[in-house]
Each structure stands twice: as C-alpha cells, then as structure tokens.
C-alpha cells in the first residue's frame, strides 16, 4: 500500500484564502468561523492518539527553494533558467547553494566549487549577498506572523508555524500553507515548499517531499505508515554517517528502526537513540518555540571527517564561535551569561560543559577563551564529530523586543553538514475526511 500523498496543487485546486495585503479590508470581512469560513465543512486533522502522543496540533514547516540562488535569479532576470550557484570562489571555495538548474549537473550545497565547475562548466558562480537574504528573511517573518505568533525560525530560509489556533480562522493547515506559498510567490517573487503535520519532525520531513515549489501533508492516521517506509537517511538527525551506521546494524527505513528497543538505540547512538526511538513511533511533542520563549542561542557543526587533532578541534571551535557571534549580534537583546560547549564523539556519546559569568557573553575574545577552556576538558582520545556552542541564561528583558532569534535546537539538523532529514497527504486527502 502506498503512502497517500497530495499532488502539487493544480490551478483548479488553487485556493485564495487570504487577500494579499495585511490590511486589505476584504480580509476583515472574511468569515473566519462558521459555515462560510474558508475550510468550513472540512474536518481538521483528527486527534488520534498515536502512542499516547496528541496529534491535534497543526504544524507547518516552510522552506524556501534554492534560497540564495533563487534570490539572485529573481534580482537578475538574465540568470533565470541558468545553472547558478552562490558560493566561494577561492581554491578552497565551497558552494552555499545551487539553483535547481545547476542541481541537474550534480552541483549542490557544501560541494567544493572546483568540483562544481568541473561538473558544470557553464555554472554561473555568484558571491553571496547576505544583507539581501536577511531582508527576505525579515519579510517572511512578517508574513508568517499574519497567520500565527507561534513562529520558530530554524535558519535564514525556514520556519515552523503552529497554526492550531491561527489568526485567520482557517481550519486546515494545508490551506494556510498553500496560501502562504502563494503569497510568497506573489509578494516576494520566490517559491517555497511547505510541509504540514501534527508535529515538527513530520512537518519538516514533509516540506522536502515535493521540493521545489510543493506542498505535502502527513495526516496523523497515515503517519505510522509513512514513517515505516521512510528511508533512514531522511530521518531528522540522520546524516550520511549516522545513516551508514544504521545500515550497518540493519536499519534501512523507519520500519526497521522501529524494531530496535530503546536500550539498543541508546547503546548505538547515545542520547540521539531516544530521539530515533520516538521518531520511529511518530512521537515528537516539542512545541514551536517563539523568539520570546527561546532560552538559548547557539549553533553547531557536524564534520565530514571526525576531528582527531587538538589543532583541528580548535580551528573548528573558532568557526563555531564566529557563527555564534553572528547570531548573537543579530539579537543584541539576548543577554546570555552561560556558555555551553557540546561535543559529540565518533561513538555518538556526547558531553556538555558550561561556564557562567556575571556579564553576558558578547565578544569573540570572551567566548573563545572560555570555549577553549571548556574544550580542554573534553576527551581527546576519541574523534569528535560535532561541536556546538550556545549561550543561555538570558537576563530579563528590559524592553519588549520583537526581533527574531534563531534558536538552538536540540537536534543537529539546522546547519551545513549536519544531519538533515527531510511526507503529505494533501489538501485533497484531508478533504476526504
Ligand atoms: P537550504 O534550505 O538547506 O537549501 P536551499 O534553500 O538552497 O535549497 P532547497 O531548500 O530548495 O533544497 O539552505 C538555505 C540557504 O542556506 C541556502 O540557500 C544557502 C545556505 N546554505 C549554505 O550556505 N550552506 C549549506 O551547506 C546549506 C545547506 C545552506
Ligand atoms: Mg531552502
Ligand atoms: Mg532551509
């Protein structure tokens, strides 16, 4: 039996739920409840108990398509239809992202630019324009907040939205997702893909199912079936190395994963074992955390090759520090006085070490000095596969600040080289219910 999957919306299926300006009077006159409300007559996601997990929540994950490259193509029409990549040009340059035209040649994020050029000699390589991308990010944030205040950005081009209760009174999360996608197209001249489900893990995987420019919904009553068929490398938190390890122990998909006991999984994957155990059962109760509730800001890097030398670890620690600083500088209101280092070893065991001070961590010197001291306490006999740094313990906010901040997530799925996962039953399927 195959998993139900929603089709990419056809023009006939196109829904215009929300007039496309925030203050459009038509919006105000739109029925938000009752039989004439958008989505009325359509039953929302059923609240089926899935291993004791509530499935009433409606979570959308939106992720922009080929983000940096798409912005470049938007701003320079001559680039449209061409294989475009954004990235470093030097001998050690790396591709940040590639347009879908370039991906057909095997050009993708994290690929060495030199290899990318060999694969695609006509590749148009562009330098990143971070300020422009940040501007789009701000526009996205504004748009998302028209639907719900429960918005959690994972990175510059993606966010979770909890639309269980939403400001537009629309019942079906997939209708909201479709409307957001349409508005992104019309207002930002960019495309986004969306995933819809009852939890973050599944919504995030869902958004990858119909990329680019697609929508996919995983309905609670299909979740277990979907997960059972999901290839192991698509699971959130399972990157190439973990996938290899999984296959080594006979786990090729969610069904295989489910056969393993919790002790088996934790013995193989340390703390992450529990996460895999729960994901295999469709369990992910993590709420969508807004910027105001965020308790920490941080970042982490998973390395292609385990770090085996002290110098190698310090160099990477330096890079993580710079990334952390960049995030902190974007959120000056965040006053974290505890610095935490996370180290994950080749055997998947993990340690965290923290240090607190009176003043907030805000400079490179402060952070690097303390981070190095914390790193010196780490076990040097094992290869290091991940280093993370975060600051927490924010001082109480003196003034309300509406800036967004990127939240340190408990799983390594956000950044480059980390283990990124990537389901649906779409609007049409939901409507059958
Ligand atoms: P992604 O959302 O991972 O990728 P993407 O938007 O380019 O492509 P798609 O989602 O359609 O698969 O990352 C968002 C941006 O983050 C990406 O455009 C560039 C940047 N980025 C890097 O700089 N390095 C990386 O390794 C990755 C994965 C992304
Ligand atoms: Mg993207
Ligand atoms: Mg993304």
Image (cartoon, rainbow, N blue to C red):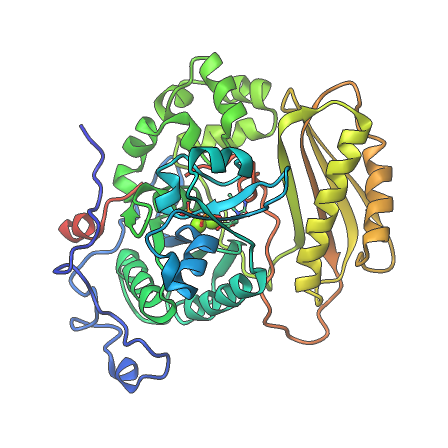
Which residue corresponds to the image point at 33% horizontal and 48% vertical from the top-left?
Answer: 212
- Residue name at image x 54 percent, y 24 percent: 241
Q: Position of residue 377 (x, y in %)?
A: 84, 31
Residue under the point 54% across and 35% down? 114
Q: Residue at x 56, y 30 (%)?
A: 272
Residue 163 shows in this picture: no
Residue 353 position (above or below residue 399): above
- Which x, y percent locates residue 138? 51, 68
Image position of 107 with respect to 364: above or below: above
Q: Quadrant of residue 303?
A: top right
Q: Does residue 208 appear to the left or right of 268 in the view shown? A: left
Q: Nearer the viewer, residue 320 or 280?
A: 320
Residue 71: x %, y % from top left: 44, 60
Q: Could you say which quadrant of the image residue 94 lies in?
A: top right
Q: Quadrant of residue 385?
A: top right
* Of residues 232 and 168, the one drawn nearer to the viewer in this rendering: 232
- Location of the N terminus (image quadrant): top left
Residue 169: in sight, yes or no?
yes
Q: How many marks?
A: 0
x and y, in percent, of residue 255 in the image: 35, 23
Tell me if 129 is positioned left or right of 5 in this view: right
Residue furthest bottom as drawn: 25
Residue 372, above or below 127? above
């Amino acid at each position: 039996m195959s998993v139900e999957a929603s089709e990419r919306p056809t023009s006939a299926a196109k829904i215009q739920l929300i007039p496309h300006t925030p203050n459009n009077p038509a919006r105000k006159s739109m029925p938000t409840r009752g039989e004439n409300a958008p989505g009325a007559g359509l039953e929302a996601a059923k609240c089926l108990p899935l291993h004791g997990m509530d499935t009433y929540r409606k979570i959308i994950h939106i992720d922009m398509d080929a983000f940096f490259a798409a912005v470049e193509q938007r701003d320079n029409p001559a680039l449209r239809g061409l294989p475009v990549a954004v990235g470093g040009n030097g001998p050690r340059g790396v591709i940040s992202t590639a347009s879908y035209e370039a991906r057909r040649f095997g050009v993708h994020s994290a690929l060495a630019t030199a290899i990318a050029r060999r694969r695609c000699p006509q590749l148009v390589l562009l330098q990143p324009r971070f300020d422009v991308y940040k501007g789009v990010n701000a526009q996205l944030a504004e748009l998302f907040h028209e639907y719900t205040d429960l918005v959690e950005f994972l990175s510059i081009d993606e966010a979770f939205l909890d639309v269980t209760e939403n400001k537009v009174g629309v019942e079906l999360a997939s209708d909201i997702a479709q409307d957001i996608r349409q508005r992104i197209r019309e207002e930002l001249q960019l495309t986004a893909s969306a995933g819809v489900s009852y939890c973050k893990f599944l919504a995030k995987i869902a958004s990858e199912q119909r990329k680019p420019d697609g929508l996919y919904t995983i309905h609670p009553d299909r979740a277990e079936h979907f997960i059972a068929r999901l290839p192991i490398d698509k699971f959130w938190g399972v990157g190439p190395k973990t996938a290899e390890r999984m296959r080594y122990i006979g786990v090729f998909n969610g069904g295989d994963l489910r056969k393993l006991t919790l002790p088996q999984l934790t013995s193989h994957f340390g703390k992450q074992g529990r996460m895999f155990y729960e994901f295999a059962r469709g369990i992910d109760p993590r709420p969508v955390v807004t910027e105001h509730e965020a308790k920490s800001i941080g970042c982490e890097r998973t390395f292609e090759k385990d770090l085996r030398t002290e110098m190698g670890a310090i160099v990477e620690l330096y890079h993580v520090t710079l990334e952390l600083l960049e995030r902190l500088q974007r959120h000056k209101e965040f006053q974290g006085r505890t610095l935490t280092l996370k180290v994950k070893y080749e055997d998947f065991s993990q340690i965290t070490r923290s240090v607190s001070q009176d003043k907030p961590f805000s400079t490179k010197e402060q952070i690097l000095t303390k981070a190095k001291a914390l790193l010196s306490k780490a076990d040097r006999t094992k290869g290091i596969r991940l280093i993370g740094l975060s600051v927490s313990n924010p001082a109480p906010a003196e003034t309300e600040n509406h800036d967004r901040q990127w939240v340190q997530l408990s799983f390594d799925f956000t950044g480059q080289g980390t283990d990124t996962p990537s389901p649906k039953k779409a609007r049409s399927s939901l409507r059958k219910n």
